[in-house]
Amino acid sequence: MLISAIELQEWLLRFVGVFARVGGALMVAPVFGAGVVPMRVRLMAAVLVTVLVMTALPAAPGPIAPLQPLQLFKEVMLGVAIGFVVQTAFDVLVMAGQVIGLSMGLGFANLVDPQHGVTVPVIGQLYLLLALLIFVAINGHIAVIELLADSFRSQPVGAATLGDGELATLVAWGGRIFSGGLQVALPAVVAMTVVNLAFGVMSRAAPQLNLFGVGFPITIILGFVTLWISLESLGPTFGAILDEALDVAHGIAQGTG
């Protein structure tokens, strides 16, 4: 099969546009954009996903003009917006873990978060690892790739836009980190508040009681018991938040956000 120079040029122009959007999404998306993933692996994954997406797209109706720098920037930002929305679902659990860890007295126990490359409380790291396992188990990474492929049907290469509606959706969705984190952490926070109130009453009734020696281990033990009880509802809660994130990302990808 012979390929003309014009066909090769159009394929390369299309590849650059698709790669800009896919690369922007994978740069911040969960699993793909983790800090522990080497840059070469990210680049190879972006190229592979770009080729897969291009094979699933219909043929271009006409010649493709070279992308201007501004339009190429829009392609990257659209991909970043899609990946950011999905990543926010994981940040909800990190926020919840930080709140729970502080209420349990484990704020000093930090681990390096491989997703962001920063230190977070150990409870937040536990929630993040569980979220990554759930995300891969329910084929969330495949859903992200399908979402990127669908975005090229509504917004072809060279037509990517982020209007005022999409930007407002991104800003509003950023607040979901706090509301969702409170939703996940609320049972443990309420339990720890009741325990602290109980120790406050005990300190008034028996001032000679050493609260630091007695209250600290009891608070940690009850905190872990609360975590163990609440783990059963973590999966459905995170699944609902992830479905909501995918719906928001789909709206942005379709230009109807």
Image (spheres, rainbow, N blue to C red):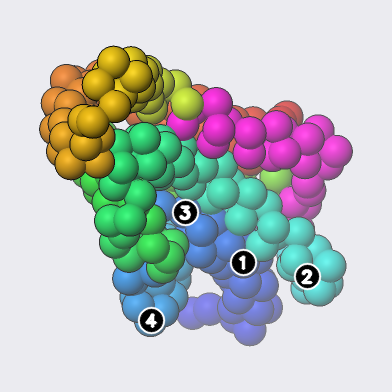
Q: For the magenta stretch, what is the residue range? A: 157-181
- Assess whether residue 177 is covered by the magenta stretch: yes
Residue bearing mark 3: 29
Give the mark nearest the N terminus, 2 or 3: 3
Residue bearing mark 1: 20
* Percent x, y of residue 255: 73, 36
Which amino acid, mark 1? Ala
Q: In this view, does 107 lie above or below 131?
A: below
Q: Kindly report the distance in space between the C-alpha atoms of the residues bearing marks 1 and 2.
A: 11 Å
- Assess whether residue 164 is covered by the magenta stretch: yes
Cβ atoms at labels 1 and 2 below 8 Å apart: yes
Which amino acid, mark 4? Arg
Give the mark nearest the N terminus, 3 or 4: 3
Look at the numbered disc 2 and give the secondary structure of its residue: loop
Q: Residue 67 carries which label?
A: 2
Residue bearing mark 4: 40
